[in-house]
Amino acid sequence: MKKEIKIGSSDFKRIIDDNGYLVDKTMLIKEFLDNGSYVLLMPRPKRFGKTLNLSMIEYFFDIQKLDSAKIFSDFEIINKKEFCNEHQNKYPVINISLKSVKETNWENCLSKFKIEISELYQQHRYLLKSEKLELEDKQIFQKITSKIADEAEYQKSLGNLCYYLQKHFNQEVIVLVDEYDAPIITSFRYTAKPIKNFQKEKLTYYEKVIGFMQSFLGDTFKGNKSLKKGLITGVMRVGKESIFSEWNNFDVFGVTSTYFSDKFGFTQQETEKILTHFNLEDKIKDIQKWYDGYQFGNTDKIYNPWSIVNYISKKNDGFKAYWINASDDSLIKAKISEPNIKDTIEKLIAGETIVKIIRENFVFPDFEQKSELLWTLLLQSGFLTAKKKVSLNRYELAIPNYELKFVFTDLILDWIEVKYKLNQDLLINASNHLINNELEDFEECFKKIVGDTLSYFDFAPVREKRKGKIVIPQERFFQVYTLGLLAILSNDYIIKSNRESGEGRYDIILIPYDKKNNGIILEIKYIENQKDTEEYTDFTDRINRKINEALQQIERKKYYKELIANKIEQIKIIRVPIVFAGKEPYVMEITEE
């Protein structure tokens, strides 16, 4: 029977029992146990297979799941016979997820912690009949399952459960913690800013969560003689000074690490195999465009697994941005209005790369004061990918694929709409006129957009105090501004700016994905607006000369060569000059009144 896509379950055995298709990641089991660290932290973006991988590890090692050995019979790990004989179903396993611990205040958060821990304990109720546990151990156990224990007992509950299991089975315990950072990220979001330090009488919601987690995880993973091995997953690496203080037995294998780099997300080979299974080999190029582009460590061409399986299961609906519905962009939205952030994101949308410092020890309170931490957040959360390491902690970052470009475009458009109260219908009309070579109508719409959204103070030049020279050219401002507006076309066009083509560097170029559509080159010029102080004919002449200068520059420097290289016919290439007189744009030559 042909295996099927199963969405909605991260239970390894259930997917197999239901004839579900699984990409083989079983060598993670051996690599995890063979690694020299007692505790491993593996942060990865949401929906990249973390929960499923932990379920797989649980079924392989769990001493209580002896009947599950057969489910690995078709997977690569079974070829490691000596390893399987020594370790398969030989250890008690604790597997707890904190991904649902997302509350708006500490009281509700603690209640959710109690529920999750109580349910974990209930899975091991057989311990209440164990002759190896003391009466007082069983009494604490009962309090946890009944959700009547005090906060301190819940803080120590994970470490205590290790102790109980080790006593009962006379075997060290494997502990798996999924989405450990979910309560931390949520508490940061719902804590009044700015967050102050701990040296005060009343702790904030965020600080209470940090305090709880320090004991909850600390007692489990630091100096725990009952521990065989620990694996923690999440999205972020929260800094040592907040959660992992003074730990010396754990190591981090994040998105820039070469270790375990192919164990989350689908590799090129895995993607081709799954597409072949579902008779979708002919879609590989489109799937690459939409869902490929991640690089973890030294493994490139990593595909977003959540988007792949959703596309396969809903292929008749076509390609969509599936992953954003599972991710969280609230912290990004909070930062996009800060200086240089929007401009940098627009460069990324245009296909450029940026080089940024990546801080692996991420402390959330620092996020309020240090805008540059946004790039660390974007990388670790999966919104960006690291193309290469430039120096010790500097990486070249890029938007990985079309799906994420769509996400960033929406962020920019939402920001423009909120900041400038821009009517998106007007923007859509202007964009359609542009790509259909209706330049007169485009000019009319574009003038209205600029008039409604810009004031002189948005682009007024500043002067360097020492020399009194203008250091912010208006042409560059209007280029970035126009680039941001054109982001609405990123569904159908590759948008680039300031790239070499022919014999120079164009301002903006739009390369259609569908080669039947028009390609567009925009060259932007600026003149001072003296319309009110000069003769109309002089003003007209200045505008027209500048428009012609822009058109001649496109031809002279052969900016169209990149479009031709992308198989766009000359007849389909639209040359668009935009001359800003002050803040008023002109695209067409002015005719005599």
Image (cartoon, rainbow, N blue to C red):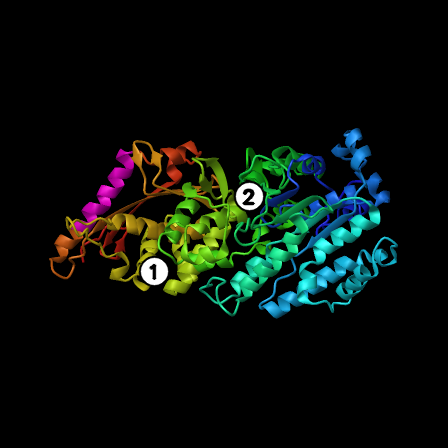
Do residues under tags 2 and 1 come within 8 Å of each other at their CB atoms?
no
Three-letter code for the amino acid on which mark 2 is drawn: Trp
Nearer mark to the viewer, of 2 and 1? 2
Residue designated by label 1: 449
- Taking the image as shown, residue 590 lies to the left or right of residue 111, namely left
Residue 436 visible in image = no
Point out residue 44 in the picture as x, y percentages from the top left corner: 59, 46
| First in sequence: mark 2 vs mark 1 | 2
Element at label 2: helix
- Taking the image as shown, residue 529 lies to the left or right of residue 161, namely left
Residue designated by label 2: 290
Point out residue 547 in the picture as x, y percentages from the top left corner: 23, 46
Q: Give the range drawn in magenta.
A: 542-557
On residue 58, the disc is none
Residue 26, compared with residue 103, is above or below; it is: above
- Taking the image as shown, residue 587 lies to the left or right of residue 240, namely left
Q: Does the magenta stretch include residue 117?
A: no
- Taking the image as shown, residue 567 lies to the left or right of residue 104, namely left
Q: How crowded is mark 2: few (under 14 residues within 10 Å), some or many (20 or more)?
A: many
Q: Nearer the viewer, residue 232 or 547?
A: 232
